[in-house]
Image (cartoon, rainbow, N blue to C red):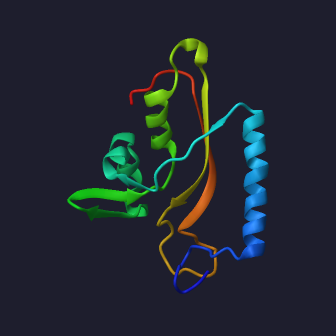
Amino acid sequence: ADEYAPGAPFFLPAGAHVYNKLVELMRKECWKEGYSEVLSPQMLSARIFEKSGHIAHYEADMFLWDHEGQRVGLKPMSCPCHCVMFNRGGAVSYKSLPIRLSEFGVVHRNECRGSLSGLRRVVRFCQDDAHTSARRSKW
């Protein structure tokens, strides 16, 4: 960790190499299981997290602020984004189900109050976030 980015790593060339190899390995595993890779925005309207119920449970652990008169936040998880994607372009008929979406997405969480020390508590990390949708949701 660095004083300019507490809880978020700077990846030097060797670290970036290891990181990319891990993503490459996970990407191959997801493809083998029939997942399609997607990407979702980093900054989103807080409404998506209100609708999903995440704000009700995790608001204190989220990075939220007002931007041009709208409440927005950094993505703490990809679940609501994948629901939106599924409903906007997912299943055309039951024959196309299940839809499998995977994302190696950077997320930001403000968990675990206290001091940051090294990378024991991170606020920015990448997770292999995959979702399988087998029927229409309430989204």
Position above or below: 98 against 59: above
Query: What's the residue at 40%, 51% (across, down)?
Result: 57
Residue 100 horizontal/vertical position (percent): 62, 31
In the foreground, 50 or 40: 40
Identify the image quadrant of residue 131: top right
Q: Nearer the viewer, residue 101 or 7?
A: 101
> Outermost residue toward the bottom?
3
Residue at (53, 79) in percent of width and height: 5
Instruction: Please tell me which residue lies in front, 92 or 111.
Output: 92
> 71 left or right of 134?
left
Instruction: Locate the C terminus by quadrant.
Output: top left
Would residue 1 appear left or right of 6 to someone viewing this image?
Answer: right
- The location of residue 96, given as percent across then percent down, is 59, 18
List x then y, in percent, for residue 49: 37, 47
Residue 53 drawn at (x, y percent):
38, 43
Image quadrant in which the N terminus is located:
bottom right
Residue drawn where x is 62% and y is 74% of the image: 9
Which residue is most to the front? 13
- Left of 67 or right of it: where is 9? right
Q: Residue at position x 54%, y 87% from top?
A: 3
